[in-house]
Amino acid sequence: MKSQFPFGGRHQRTGSHLEACQECAATVRRERQYLERLREAPIPPASQDLTARLLARTHELAAQRRPGA
């Protein structure tokens, strides 16, 4: 569960508080801008090393004894 006090336990993240507290409003605005940039960022392709490790692990799991087999 997300804390109701995101700013070091001093303040609440409620609409009425954000209207009155410029510090918290600026923090929320920066968080939203950061998240928006992340959503718009391209997803980098997986490296060949990661792909090889995933395939190896998949083969390991497939080779394990299956329940009911």
Image (cartoon, rainbow, N blue to C red):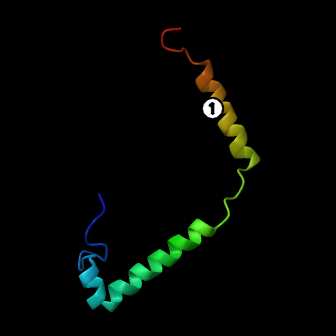
Which residue does the image show at 54% across and 72% down from the upper left?
36
Residue drawn at (68%, 32%), measured in percent from left and top? 56
Does residue 46 appear left or right of residue 17 in this picture? right
Of the pair 41 and 48, the residue shown nearer to us: 41
Residue 62 in picture, x, y percent from top left: 61, 22
When asked about the image quadrant of residue 26, the answer is bottom left
Image coordinates of residue 42 in percent, x first then y, are 68, 64
Residue 69 on image: x %, y %: 53, 8
> Is residue 60 found left or right of 12 in the rendered image?
right
Residue 29: percent from the left, percent from the top? Answer: 43, 82
Residue lying at 34% horizontally and 88% vertically, measured from the top left: 23
Q: Which residue is mark 1?
A: 57
Quadrant in which the N terminus appears: bottom left
As helix, strand or loop, the secondary structure at mark 1 comes to helix
* Along the line of sight, the residue nearer the viewer: 51 or 33: 33
**1 relative position to 43: left or right:** left
Does residue 67 lie above or below 17 as drawn? above
Q: Amino acid at mark 1?
A: Arg
- Splitting the image into 4 quarters, where does residue 39 fall? bottom right
- Reply above or below: 46 against 55: below
In the displayed structure, would residue 36 be above or below residue 19?
above
